[in-house]
């Protein structure tokens, strides 16, 4: 069981790294991830239908940690798909209210499941038999978990609730980013208005611009090293008419690359040297 679940988790994480590297999750990207994860989730379901757990500890571990981890990704991208699909076309305040409404829904879910949140977060185990073993459901403990329409071979009292909790954790970060993006766009537009008009527009990748911005920041060549990364990125966005999104998270992704972490800068060096060699000949 561990082998197939590890393989599925690895496939999902690799696809997230490739497809969502710039962390700019449009509804199209979210839908793509839903369509990528769902067949893997169904593959896991079919496997569990035929699998005999070695003991109750293995079964609890699967329904408490493994299945919720995978299902949470599916719930997360589904929530983003729905959220972005329904985003209103209005001013910034209308858009912010749209995201804040979802934040309020997450708070409501947390409040209505507060006892279970505390149980799970504290790593308690005394109710695991009722929460995470099939056939031990207790309606007094799980009166709001929708047991009646669940797959009895692939569901327990609370595995879906855990997945929803994990998805909400990720979604809360996403919502914070989106709200910050709205504020950042306001700052960029204000900065852009104060700059003289220029014909230059960034036509490279967003990741390349972020790599360049962090290189400038790391080198300390602006204002004797006193320009912070936010100022540098805002200037790049305003000057070159580009939206860099959540550049810090993209930077973290770049930093975690296994190879060629400075791909764009290396490319600049290579092309400049080639140009120099051409001029010499």
Image (cartoon, rainbow, N blue to C red):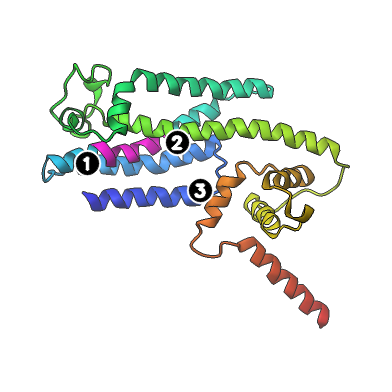
- Vertical placement of 198 versus 92: above or below? below
Q: Which of marks 3 and 2 is nearer the N terminus?
A: 3
Query: Quick one: label 2, few (<14), some, or many (20+) residues within 10 Å?
Result: some
Q: Earlier in the sequence, mark 1 or mark 3?
A: 3
Image coords of residue 69 (percent x, y): 33, 40
Q: Earlier in the sequence, mark 1 or mark 2?
A: 1
Residue 57 appears in view: yes
Image coords of residue 166 (percent x, y): 38, 34
Q: Position of 239 compared to 92: left or right?
A: right
Q: Position of 41 compared to 200: left or right?
A: left
Q: Name the residue under label 3.
A: 19
Closer to viewer: mark 1 or mark 3? 1
Q: In which quarter of the image is the C terminus?
A: bottom right
- The magenta segment: 64-77
Query: Quick one: label 1, few (<14), some, or many (20+) residues within 10 Å?
Result: some
Q: Mark 1 points at which residue?
A: 61
For the point 69% across and 22% down, which residue is it?
Answer: 91
């Amino acid at each position: 069981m561990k082998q197939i679940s590890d393989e599925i988790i690895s496939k999902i994480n690799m696809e997230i790294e490739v497809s969502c590297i710039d962390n700019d999750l449009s509804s199209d990207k979210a839908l793509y991830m839903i369509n990528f994860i769902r067949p893997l989730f169904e593959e896991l379901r079919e496997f569990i239908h035929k699998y005999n757990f070695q003991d109750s500890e293995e079964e609890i571990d699967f329904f408490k940690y493994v299945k919720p981890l995978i299902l949470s990704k599916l719930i997360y991208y589904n929530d983003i798909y729905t959220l972005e699909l329904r985003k209103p076309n209005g001013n910034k305040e209308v858009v912010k209210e749209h995201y804040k409404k979802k934040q309020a829904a997450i708070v409501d879910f947390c409040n209505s499941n507060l006892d279970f949140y505390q149980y799970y977060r504290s790593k308690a185990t005394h109710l695991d038999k009722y929460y995470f073993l099939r056939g031990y459901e207790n309606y007094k403990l799980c009166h709001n978990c929708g047991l009646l329409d669940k797959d009895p071979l692939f569901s327990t009292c609370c595995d879906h609730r855990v997945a929803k909790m994990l998805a909400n954790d990720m979604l809360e970060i996403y919502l914070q980013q989106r709200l910050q993006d709205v504020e950042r766009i306001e700052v960029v537009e204000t900065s852009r208005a104060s700059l003289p008009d220029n014909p230059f527009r960034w036509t490279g990748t967003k990741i390349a611009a972020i790599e360049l911005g962090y290189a400038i920041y790391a080198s300390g060549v602006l204002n004797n090293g006193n320009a912070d990364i936010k100022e540098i990125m805002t200037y790049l966005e305003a000057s070159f008419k580009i939206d860099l999104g959540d550049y810090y998270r993209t930077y973290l992704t770049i930093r975690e690359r296994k190879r060629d972490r400075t791909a764009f800068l290396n490319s600049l060096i290579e092309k400049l040297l080639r140009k120099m060699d051409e001029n010499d000949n």
